[in-house]
Amino acid sequence: MPTSVPSPLNTALPLHWRCGSRSQTALHLFLGTAALLAGLLITMLAVSASAQETVFNVPNADVLDRGKFYAEFDFSYRPSDGGATYTPRFVAGAGHRIEVGINVGGLATPGNQHTTPTPNIKWKAYDGGDNGWAFVVGDNVFLPAQNRRYNAGNYAYLEFAKAWKTKTRVTAGAYYFTRDVVSTGQRAGGQFAIEQPINSRLTLAADWYTGDQVLGYLTPGAAVKLTPAVTWYILYQIGNHGVTDGNHQLLTEVGWNF
Protein backbone atom coordinates (compact mmCIF):
# COMPACT_ATOMS: atom_id res chain seq x y z
CA MET A 1 0.00 0.00 0.00
CA PRO A 2 2.66 2.45 -0.98
CA THR A 3 1.18 5.55 -2.51
CA SER A 4 -2.28 4.65 -1.33
CA VAL A 5 -2.68 1.60 0.68
CA PRO A 6 0.99 -4.07 -1.89
CA SER A 7 -0.16 -8.71 -3.20
CA PRO A 8 -2.39 -9.32 -4.92
CA LEU A 9 -0.75 -11.56 -4.11
CA ASN A 10 0.76 -11.21 -1.57
CA THR A 11 0.03 -12.42 -5.10
CA ALA A 12 -0.90 -10.13 -2.66
CA LEU A 13 -1.88 -10.36 -4.16
CA PRO A 14 -0.22 -13.41 -0.60
CA LEU A 15 -1.26 -16.98 -0.88
CA HIS A 16 -2.28 -18.27 2.55
CA TRP A 17 -1.73 -22.00 2.93
CA ARG A 18 -3.57 -23.88 5.64
CA CYS A 19 -1.15 -25.18 8.25
CA GLY A 20 -0.38 -25.46 11.97
CA SER A 21 2.73 -23.96 13.68
CA ARG A 22 5.26 -24.03 16.48
CA SER A 23 6.70 -20.73 17.69
CA GLN A 24 10.35 -21.80 17.44
CA THR A 25 9.94 -23.08 13.89
CA ALA A 26 8.09 -19.90 12.95
CA LEU A 27 10.87 -17.76 14.41
CA HIS A 28 13.54 -19.66 12.48
CA LEU A 29 11.65 -19.27 9.20
CA PHE A 30 10.92 -15.61 9.95
CA LEU A 31 14.62 -14.89 10.47
CA GLY A 32 15.54 -16.87 7.38
CA THR A 33 12.94 -15.07 5.31
CA ALA A 34 14.14 -11.71 6.63
CA ALA A 35 17.62 -12.61 5.40
CA LEU A 36 16.12 -13.58 2.03
CA LEU A 37 14.29 -10.24 1.94
CA ALA A 38 17.53 -8.35 2.51
CA GLY A 39 19.31 -10.32 -0.19
CA LEU A 40 16.51 -9.81 -2.70
CA LEU A 41 16.42 -6.11 -1.88
CA ILE A 42 20.11 -5.78 -2.67
CA THR A 43 19.55 -7.68 -5.91
CA MET A 44 16.67 -5.43 -6.86
CA LEU A 45 18.73 -2.31 -6.30
CA ALA A 46 21.46 -3.75 -8.47
CA VAL A 47 19.38 -4.85 -11.44
CA SER A 48 16.19 -2.75 -11.12
CA ALA A 49 14.04 -5.88 -11.13
CA SER A 50 11.05 -5.75 -8.96
CA ALA A 51 5.26 -6.76 -7.01
CA GLN A 52 2.62 -4.48 -7.78
CA GLU A 53 1.01 -1.98 -5.45
CA THR A 54 -2.14 -3.18 -3.71
CA VAL A 55 -4.74 -1.98 -1.26
CA PHE A 56 -4.04 -4.94 1.03
CA ASN A 57 -4.39 -7.87 -1.36
CA VAL A 58 -6.34 -6.44 -4.30
CA PRO A 59 -4.22 -4.35 -6.71
CA ASN A 60 -4.88 -0.63 -6.42
CA ALA A 61 -5.02 1.92 -9.23
CA ASP A 62 -1.61 3.44 -8.44
CA VAL A 63 1.61 2.85 -10.33
CA LEU A 64 5.07 3.95 -9.27
CA ASP A 65 6.89 6.53 -11.33
CA ARG A 66 9.90 5.42 -13.32
CA GLY A 67 12.92 5.00 -11.05
CA LYS A 68 10.81 4.64 -7.87
CA PHE A 69 10.86 1.44 -5.81
CA TYR A 70 8.79 -0.19 -3.08
CA ALA A 71 9.64 -3.18 -0.87
CA GLU A 72 7.33 -4.96 1.56
CA PHE A 73 7.31 -7.88 3.97
CA ASP A 74 3.98 -9.54 4.92
CA PHE A 75 3.32 -11.84 7.87
CA SER A 76 0.04 -13.65 8.52
CA TYR A 77 -0.97 -15.68 11.58
CA ARG A 78 -3.97 -17.99 11.87
CA PRO A 79 -5.12 -18.26 15.54
CA SER A 80 -7.13 -21.43 14.98
CA ASP A 81 -4.08 -23.61 14.20
CA GLY A 82 -1.02 -21.39 14.66
CA GLY A 83 -0.23 -21.39 10.94
CA ALA A 84 1.92 -18.55 9.63
CA THR A 85 2.97 -17.26 6.19
CA TYR A 86 5.80 -14.93 5.13
CA THR A 87 5.78 -12.99 1.86
CA PRO A 88 8.44 -10.55 0.60
CA ARG A 89 7.34 -8.28 -2.26
CA PHE A 90 9.06 -5.70 -4.48
CA VAL A 91 7.79 -3.13 -6.96
CA ALA A 92 9.53 -0.86 -9.47
CA GLY A 93 8.15 1.90 -11.67
CA ALA A 94 8.92 1.25 -15.34
CA GLY A 95 7.49 4.44 -16.84
CA HIS A 96 4.51 4.96 -19.19
CA ARG A 97 2.11 4.20 -16.27
CA ILE A 98 3.57 0.68 -15.89
CA GLU A 99 5.05 -1.01 -12.84
CA VAL A 100 6.65 -4.43 -12.55
CA GLY A 101 7.28 -6.56 -9.52
CA ILE A 102 7.94 -9.89 -7.90
CA ASN A 103 6.39 -11.66 -4.92
CA VAL A 104 7.82 -14.74 -3.23
CA GLY A 105 4.87 -16.75 -1.92
CA GLY A 106 4.42 -20.21 -0.44
CA LEU A 107 6.66 -19.63 2.61
CA ALA A 108 4.83 -21.02 5.63
CA THR A 109 5.23 -22.83 8.93
CA PRO A 110 4.98 -25.61 9.70
CA GLY A 111 5.03 -28.20 6.93
CA ASN A 112 6.51 -28.31 3.45
CA GLN A 113 7.49 -25.08 1.76
CA HIS A 114 5.98 -24.20 -1.62
CA THR A 115 8.29 -21.35 -2.57
CA THR A 116 6.75 -19.61 -5.58
CA PRO A 117 8.38 -16.59 -7.22
CA THR A 118 5.66 -14.56 -8.95
CA PRO A 119 6.72 -11.88 -11.44
CA ASN A 120 3.93 -9.47 -12.32
CA ILE A 121 3.04 -6.35 -14.26
CA LYS A 122 0.39 -3.65 -13.87
CA TRP A 123 -0.58 -1.03 -16.45
CA LYS A 124 -2.79 1.97 -15.78
CA ALA A 125 -4.35 2.03 -19.23
CA TYR A 126 -6.45 5.11 -18.43
CA ASP A 127 -5.77 7.93 -15.98
CA GLY A 128 -8.59 10.45 -15.93
CA GLY A 129 -6.76 12.96 -13.76
CA ASP A 130 -9.25 15.45 -12.29
CA ASN A 131 -12.27 13.29 -13.12
CA GLY A 132 -10.98 10.67 -10.67
CA TRP A 133 -11.38 7.65 -12.96
CA ALA A 134 -8.74 5.05 -13.73
CA PHE A 135 -8.66 1.74 -15.59
CA VAL A 136 -6.02 -0.84 -14.72
CA VAL A 137 -5.06 -4.24 -16.13
CA GLY A 138 -2.48 -6.64 -14.77
CA ASP A 139 -1.02 -10.12 -14.90
CA ASN A 140 0.91 -12.39 -12.51
CA VAL A 141 2.84 -15.53 -13.46
CA PHE A 142 3.33 -18.17 -10.74
CA LEU A 143 6.54 -20.20 -11.07
CA PRO A 144 6.66 -22.86 -8.32
CA ALA A 145 10.22 -23.68 -7.36
CA GLN A 146 9.74 -26.07 -4.43
CA ASN A 147 7.30 -28.94 -3.74
CA ARG A 148 5.34 -28.11 -6.88
CA ARG A 149 1.60 -28.55 -7.03
CA TYR A 150 1.58 -27.29 -10.64
CA ASN A 151 4.22 -26.27 -13.19
CA ALA A 152 3.10 -22.68 -13.82
CA GLY A 153 0.02 -20.58 -13.18
CA ASN A 154 -1.51 -17.25 -14.07
CA TYR A 155 -3.64 -14.52 -12.48
CA ALA A 156 -5.07 -11.86 -14.79
CA TYR A 157 -7.35 -8.99 -13.83
CA LEU A 158 -8.92 -5.74 -14.92
CA GLU A 159 -10.49 -3.09 -12.73
CA PHE A 160 -11.94 0.41 -12.61
CA ALA A 161 -11.27 2.89 -9.81
CA LYS A 162 -13.00 6.14 -8.92
CA ALA A 163 -11.66 8.77 -6.50
CA TRP A 164 -13.62 11.74 -5.13
CA LYS A 165 -12.57 15.10 -3.68
CA THR A 166 -12.96 13.60 -0.19
CA LYS A 167 -10.07 11.28 -1.24
CA THR A 168 -12.37 8.29 -0.95
CA ARG A 169 -11.49 5.75 -3.64
CA VAL A 170 -13.50 2.71 -4.72
CA THR A 171 -12.10 -0.09 -6.89
CA ALA A 172 -14.11 -2.80 -8.68
CA GLY A 173 -12.91 -5.41 -11.13
CA ALA A 174 -12.73 -9.04 -12.22
CA TYR A 175 -10.09 -11.75 -11.85
CA TYR A 176 -9.17 -15.05 -13.46
CA PHE A 177 -6.84 -17.72 -12.01
CA THR A 178 -5.68 -20.81 -13.86
CA ARG A 179 -6.21 -24.19 -12.18
CA ASP A 180 -4.32 -25.16 -9.00
CA VAL A 181 -3.16 -21.61 -8.19
CA VAL A 182 -5.89 -20.70 -5.68
CA SER A 183 -8.12 -23.78 -6.08
CA THR A 184 -8.07 -27.20 -7.70
CA GLY A 185 -9.89 -25.76 -10.71
CA GLN A 186 -9.90 -22.50 -12.62
CA ARG A 187 -11.43 -19.58 -10.77
CA ALA A 188 -13.02 -16.33 -11.93
CA GLY A 189 -14.76 -13.70 -9.85
CA GLY A 190 -14.75 -10.16 -8.55
CA GLN A 191 -12.19 -8.07 -6.66
CA PHE A 192 -13.18 -4.92 -4.80
CA ALA A 193 -11.69 -2.30 -2.49
CA ILE A 194 -12.41 0.97 -0.71
CA GLU A 195 -9.86 3.41 0.72
CA GLN A 196 -10.39 6.47 2.93
CA PRO A 197 -7.49 8.63 4.14
CA ILE A 198 -8.26 10.04 7.60
CA ASN A 199 -5.25 12.34 7.75
CA SER A 200 -1.72 12.49 6.34
CA ARG A 201 -0.63 9.48 8.43
CA LEU A 202 -3.69 7.21 8.69
CA THR A 203 -5.75 5.49 5.99
CA LEU A 204 -8.62 3.07 6.61
CA ALA A 205 -9.36 0.54 3.89
CA ALA A 206 -10.84 -2.84 3.03
CA ASP A 207 -10.58 -5.19 0.07
CA TRP A 208 -12.31 -8.40 -0.97
CA TYR A 209 -11.84 -11.30 -3.36
CA THR A 210 -15.06 -13.20 -4.06
CA GLY A 211 -15.28 -16.98 -4.27
CA ASP A 212 -14.35 -20.15 -2.45
CA GLN A 213 -10.58 -20.08 -3.02
CA VAL A 214 -7.29 -19.38 -1.24
CA LEU A 215 -7.61 -15.59 -1.59
CA GLY A 216 -11.33 -15.53 -0.76
CA TYR A 217 -11.22 -13.08 2.13
CA LEU A 218 -12.76 -9.79 3.21
CA THR A 219 -9.84 -7.79 4.61
CA PRO A 220 -10.49 -4.59 6.60
CA GLY A 221 -7.60 -2.71 8.18
CA ALA A 222 -5.51 0.41 8.50
CA ALA A 223 -2.28 1.84 7.10
CA VAL A 224 -0.13 4.04 9.33
CA LYS A 225 2.78 6.07 7.97
CA LEU A 226 5.53 5.70 10.56
CA THR A 227 7.89 7.91 8.54
CA PRO A 228 7.63 9.50 5.08
CA ALA A 229 9.16 6.30 3.64
CA VAL A 230 7.87 3.54 5.97
CA THR A 231 4.25 2.38 6.28
CA TRP A 232 2.83 -0.22 8.68
CA TYR A 233 -0.34 -2.11 7.74
CA ILE A 234 -2.46 -3.93 10.31
CA LEU A 235 -5.51 -5.87 9.15
CA TYR A 236 -7.65 -8.92 9.71
CA GLN A 237 -8.78 -11.40 7.07
CA ILE A 238 -12.25 -12.97 7.28
CA GLY A 239 -12.87 -15.96 5.04
CA ASN A 240 -15.74 -16.14 2.57
CA HIS A 241 -16.51 -19.53 4.06
CA GLY A 242 -15.57 -21.55 7.15
CA VAL A 243 -15.18 -18.60 9.53
CA THR A 244 -16.63 -20.59 12.43
CA ASP A 245 -14.13 -23.36 11.60
CA GLY A 246 -11.19 -20.98 11.96
CA ASN A 247 -10.86 -19.50 8.47
CA HIS A 248 -9.75 -16.05 9.62
CA GLN A 249 -6.32 -14.60 10.35
CA LEU A 250 -4.22 -11.60 11.29
CA LEU A 251 -2.12 -10.03 8.55
CA THR A 252 0.49 -7.34 9.12
CA GLU A 253 2.79 -5.72 6.58
CA VAL A 254 5.68 -3.25 6.59
CA GLY A 255 6.47 -1.32 3.41
CA TRP A 256 9.35 0.93 2.35
CA ASN A 257 9.28 3.52 -0.46
CA PHE A 258 12.62 4.54 -1.95
Image (cartoon, rainbow, N blue to C red):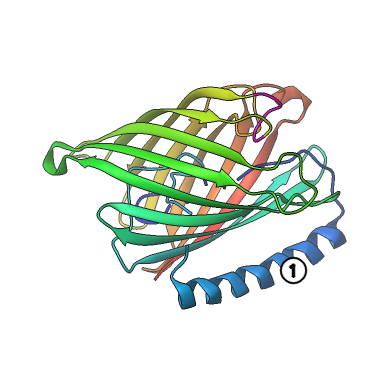
Q: Residue furthest front?
A: 151
Up the image or down, 123 lies above or below 242; here it is below
Residue 102 appears in the picture as rendered: yes
Q: What stretch is highlighted in magenta?
A: 181-185
- Density class for disc 1 (Cα within 10 Å; few <14, some 14-19, many ≥20) is few
Residue 13 appears in the picture as rendered: no
Q: Which residue lies furthest to the left in this view?
A: 130
Q: In this view, does 77 lie to the left or right of 171?
A: right
- Dividing the image into 4 quarters, which one contains the C terminus? bottom left
Up the image or down, 89 lies above or below 243; here it is below
Q: x, y (%) of residue 155?
A: 53, 37
What element does badge 1 sit on? helix
Residue 20 covered by magenta stretch? no
Residue 182 covered by magenta stretch? yes
Q: x, y (%) of residue 96?
A: 25, 55
Up the image or down, 65 lies above or below 1; here it is below
Provide the residue designation for mark 1: 32
Viewer-closest of 62 and 204: 62
Q: x, y (%) of residue 42?
A: 54, 77
Q: Dominant secondary structure of the magenta stretch?
A: loop
What residue appears at the point 43 percent right and 52 percent down from the top-left corner? 1
